[in-house]
Amino acid sequence: MTEPLILGIETSCDETAVGIVRGRTLLANVISSSVAEHARFGGVVPEIASRAHLEAMPNVLEQALNDAKVSLKDIDAFAVTAGPGLIGALLVGVSSASALSVALDKPIYGVNHLSAHIAVDALNSDHPLKPTIALLVSGGHSSILQVNDISSDVKVMGSTMDDAAGEAFDKIARLLELGFPGGPAIDKEAKAGNKSAIDFPRGLTHSNDQEAHAYDFSFSGLKTAVSRYLQQAPNAVRADVAASFQESVVDVLVTKAIAACKASGIDSLVIAGGVAANSRLREMAQERTAKAGIELRIPAMGLCTDNGAMVAALGSIAVSSGKQASQIGFAANSAAGLDQVIW
Ligand code: KG4
Ligand code: ZN
């Protein structure tokens, strides 16, 4: 029997994306971003994002089907991000996927965006995800998770107390006038800088934070420190500031993720979400997990930031593990937590 063909739709933020997978094999991953339309506002404008999704959806869908060399009637099930995310943006994806499901009489799975970021690992590797620790770092979320079963059992070990890691990158990039989105801009600028130039604070890493906040993050103190530094040293070398800031964030992320592996006795770490595209994070995680004897899995670059393949991957896992399909008419949930994986 051939494995099921799953089409995944992602519209939770500013990417209109359709991915197609057969089982664990990626066939298409088409992304249209409205990021340029938001750049002059310094952040994503929900109404602009929703309209852009509406406009982009037909072409993105058609392109994905072409790339995968399949037609809509071949699809066995649809998957769509149903939350968390911007509500108007989510609705475009959920309505589109629901219409396809009804028209083609095929099941639909509303899925959690955060779980999908981790589930995309299935497309990267020839052996399935065992119980693992996941460091999930995106523009909206930063958490350390214990993933016993991606479709049903995910425990939150720690989360950010203030900004998400990606948000911190975006805010510091604005201070450094590097543009939006800030993550890729800082990553690039930092390559020309000295990461040891400035000793910025590492949030929630003091010994007295360990009891209550061992796996939590805080980036607001770092943000203030960078801002003060720039006020006092307006002619500072921007690349040094970018590199030193990035080093502080990455050091905290990797240190806490490895501590979580050790504390839970789990020797596997997945790093997922947009910030997983960061080159220094990938490098430091590689070095330190190798030393600690932990298996490290990070999605390919193009699968870290928002995409449809990750949604299709989670849909595929839902189908293969016998999960019940969602009821047509299910509601998007902009504030969905990790307890709501399949709608
Ligand atoms: O997962 P994602 O595409 O969207 C959300 O679900 O939030 O993550 C977007 C975030 C943005 O904050 C962006 O600045 C950050 O990921 N990001 C990066 C890099 N590429 C994207 N942060 C650091 N370094 C990067 N190379
Ligand atoms: Zn995301």
Image (spheres, rainbow, N blue to C red):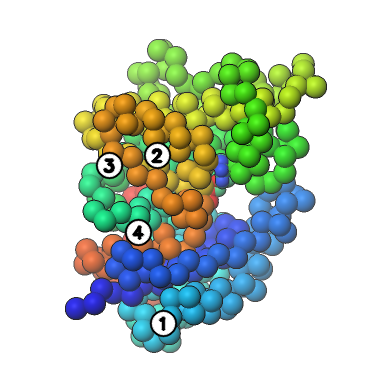
Mark 4 and mark 2: span between their CA atoms? 18 Å
Looking at the rendered image, the quarter that the C terminus falls into is: bottom left
Say which amino acid is labelled 4: Leu
Residue 15's spot in the image, x, y percent? 57, 61
Dot 3, how many residues are within 10 Å of its Cα: few (below 14), some (14-19), or many (20+)?
Answer: many
Rendered view: 53 above or below 188: below
Rendered view: 178 above or below 214: below
Please state which of the two labelled residues, at mark 3 or mark 4, is closer to the viewer.
4
Q: Secondary structure at mark 3?
A: strand
Foreground of the two, 179 or 212: 179
Which residue is label 3 attached to?
132
Residue 70's disc number: 1
Say which amino acid is labelled 2: Leu
Name the residue rendered at 24%, 77% in the picture: 2
Name the residue rendered at 65%, 67% in the picture: 52
Name the residue rendered at 40%, 12% in the picture: 207
Of the two numbered discs 2 and 1 on the same chain, state the one appearing first in sequence.
Answer: 1
Of the two numbered discs 3 and 4 on the same chain, state the one appearing first in sequence.
Answer: 4
Residue 135's disc number: 2
Instruction: Determine the residue located farthest toward the left in the rendered image.
Output: 1
Residue 227's spot in the image, x, y percent? 70, 24
Which residue is label 4 attached to?
123
Residue 58 seen: yes
Residue 245's spot in the image, x, y percent? 60, 27
Dot 2, how many residues are within 10 Å of its Cα: few (below 14), some (14-19), or many (20+)?
Answer: many
Q: Secondary structure at mark 4?
A: helix
Instruction: Determine the residue located farthest toward the top in the rendered image.
Output: 207
Residue 119's spot in the image, x, y percent? 35, 54
Contact between labelled residues 1 and 4, with CB atoms less than 8 Å apart: no
Q: Secondary structure at mark 1?
A: loop
- Left or right: residue 185 versus residue 115 is right
Mark 2 and mark 1: span between their CA atoms? 34 Å
